[in-house]
Image: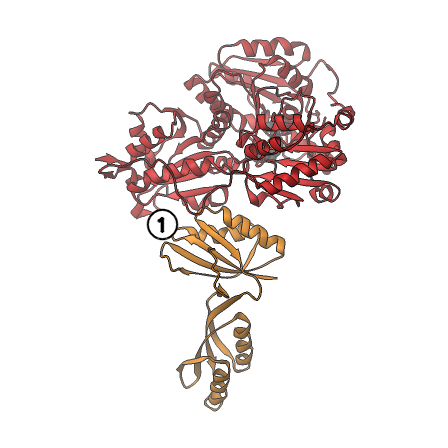
Chain colours: A red, B orange
Amino acid sequence: MISGARIMVECLEAEGVNVIFGYPGAAICPFYDALLDSSIRHILVRQEQNAGHAANGYARISGRPGVCVVTSGPGATNLVTAVASAYMDSIPIVAITGQVQSELIGRDVFQEADITGACEPFTKHSYLVKRTEDLPRIIKEAFYIASTGRPGPVLIDVPVDIQTNEIKGYKYPEAVDIIGYKPSLKGNGLQIKRACEAITAAKRPVICAGGGVFSSKAEHALLDFARKADIPVVNTLMGIGVIPSDDRLCLGMLGTHGVKMANEAIQGADLLLLCGARVGDRSMASPNQVAKRTKIIHIDVDPAEIGKNMQANIPIVGDLCSVLSQMYERIEPLEHSEWIEKCRSRSQLDMGEEDEGKYINPKRFMRLLSETAADDAILVADVGQNQIWSANCFKIRNGRFLTSGGMGTMGYSVPASVGAWTAADGRQVIAVCGDGSFQMQMMELGTIRQHGIKNKIIVMNNTKLGMVRELQDKNYGGRHSGVDLSGSPDFNLLAQAYGIPHARIDSMGEARSAINQMLSTDGPFLLECIVSPAEGSFV
Amino acid sequence: MKHTISVLVENQAGVLSKVASLFSRRGFNIDSLAVGETEDPAISRMTIVADGSDYTVEQIEKQLNKVIPVIKVKTLQEGKYISRMLSLFKVSVPADKRAEIMKIAEVMGAKVLDVTKTTITLEFCDTVERTETLQALLEPYGIKEMARTGAIAIEKGSSTVRK
Ligand SMILES: Cc1ncc(C[n+]2csc(CCOP(=O)(O)OP(=O)(O)O)c2C)c(N)n1
Ligand SMILES: [Mg+2]
């Protein structure tokens, strides 16, 4: 006889899971008990939302679904923001929640919450397990659904009796067969032919690459295609790092907080090739204007994204990596040097004054950090001005840039960097956050300390909810409401309390040596940068 | 504009709420929704009548297709399908008007199910339009109560939704 809990652990092992992020409680105790006999590493976070963000960071670096496990009721509801954040960014996570006993469901018993119901809008799929016998199939399906097609979070809600029930035995299925779920892979040949003809005819083509490039592991296919067809590439926030920032084809990030070079390229283009980008409102404020004067080719694995925000002349449904390879085979080498030079000649970034003595210039600091960090460093940006400084000034070469793009969830960076670090195989992982967002996640210093996580944390302290302050300056006549963060703790003392090495700098003269100290420390490090409360985010 | 959409789904718990919540979440208005078993007991068929522009309907179709237990979605083409809804009307009727109502029922093809001293209850199974006609004819007498199913629909000719 074997218990449901044991089956759950064995199925996770069979999926190749070696680390999970979680927080226990009564309704998930049978699983936690079975976990003791497994080689799967458990990382105890300090709040359930952070288990979800850690699984998110893990998934984005490992390229496999991240797993988080929490208890019923408040444990499950604490996880909701992380599930929603993963959904908006199409990140594959498998979230396992404990649930009250099957026969008590619906009676509002202690710590009961309808979590599959609550997460319905934010999950790719969810299960409330009814029989212990169903666990193997459900777990197999969950990993498959989370990681194929357009990835996303899958929730498995497991009542405690399903975990304790014993059955005779089980077989972990080798394949899944869901009649209503057959993600298409290859692009339609005719559409690909049309796309290549349009690209060949175009004079000023631009590629706009989004997070889908990473989901599809299409970085190389994209670069190969862009080079062969000689097309410059702009990226969305989720697409930062799709091609190396120092490549001649890379024009940087578009959108409200993007760079002029990228936005002007879109304005001047006669053909736009959207690759795994959903054209969100922050990327393109008026997509229909652009569509009027530009030929649009849209490649996405999710047919629902094509034509949702922007009409496409040539829609191609399929896995980006296969479609780009198919297009690469078909396209003749092209040459657009003049157009590319024109794009590149436009205004450079405005990095602000070198040094005002009293403060860190966050833009120059981020530039310096990217020059000093390893070539393959992973930068995890939080939300706010710090995110924009990171996005535009930290140059990704062979590393990755992670952030909560679709949801803009403050408190993402530190837990996501914990997850990223566990998958990073010794690569540098640096979280950058604001003083506001840090205080939404600073309890994770405990997790970092306990589990020997060697990530670096940079807190951009401008004593304000800077992004909102900036908005109030722009649109509310400078009336500041609810954005002052006085009362914040001394972040260095806090790091010290956790036994984490730390430093504080308030002039650019100290920046280089502080960065070196942080990066050469074998272990976690907290670096606090004192930034002017008046600093702006635009470049 | 009204659209009639047929949705084949795996017959499992929670599918109805997944489909229904999708409509409200994406801002689509449902006029009616009917669901029942199909020739294959593992598969249920939903017929949804929704109001919206062509853009909205295209989005509904695509979003429905993303729901994992949804097997097939098809918007039925105007004029190429047969649809029926079932309604029950309880009409107030003094004895001297009873014959009039019986006449209306007969002309329209409604069935008399129940008669009391003061009411008459009719069953009507027809298209949405004809149901509305009958309703308009009965209104002057006073409809005390009315119950309707959502419309169900099937394509004309030999083609089916699955193929
Ligand atoms: C969970 C959450 N709450 C509120 C917001 C709204 N918001 C966006 S940016 C921001 C300010 C962030 O302040 P801080 O972390 O100090 O970063 P800064 O902008 O100062 O760099 C706020 C409150 C959000 N994005 N996420
Ligand atoms: Mg701040």
Picture coordinates of residue A436 (x, y %)? Answer: 58, 28
Does residue B112 sit above or below A325 in this rendering? below
- Mark 1, Cα crowd under 10 Å, few <14 / some 14-19 / many 20+, is few
Q: Which residue matches tag 1? A: A106
**Ligand 1 near label 1 (Cβ, under 8 Å)?**
no
State which quadrant residue A157 falls in.
Answer: top left
Would residue B18 be visible to someone looking at this image?
yes
Q: Which SS class for mark 1?
A: loop
Quarter holding the C terminus of chain A is top right
Quarter holding the N terminus of chain A is top left
Q: Residue at x 41, y 86 (%)?
A: B117
Picture coordinates of residue A310 (x, y %)? Answer: 66, 44
Does residue B160 sit above or below A99 in this rendering? below
Picture coordinates of residue B158 (x, y %)? Answer: 47, 63
Q: Residue at x 54, y 74 (%)?
A: B130
State which quadrant residue A321 falls in.
Answer: top right
B107 or B78: which is nearer to us? B78
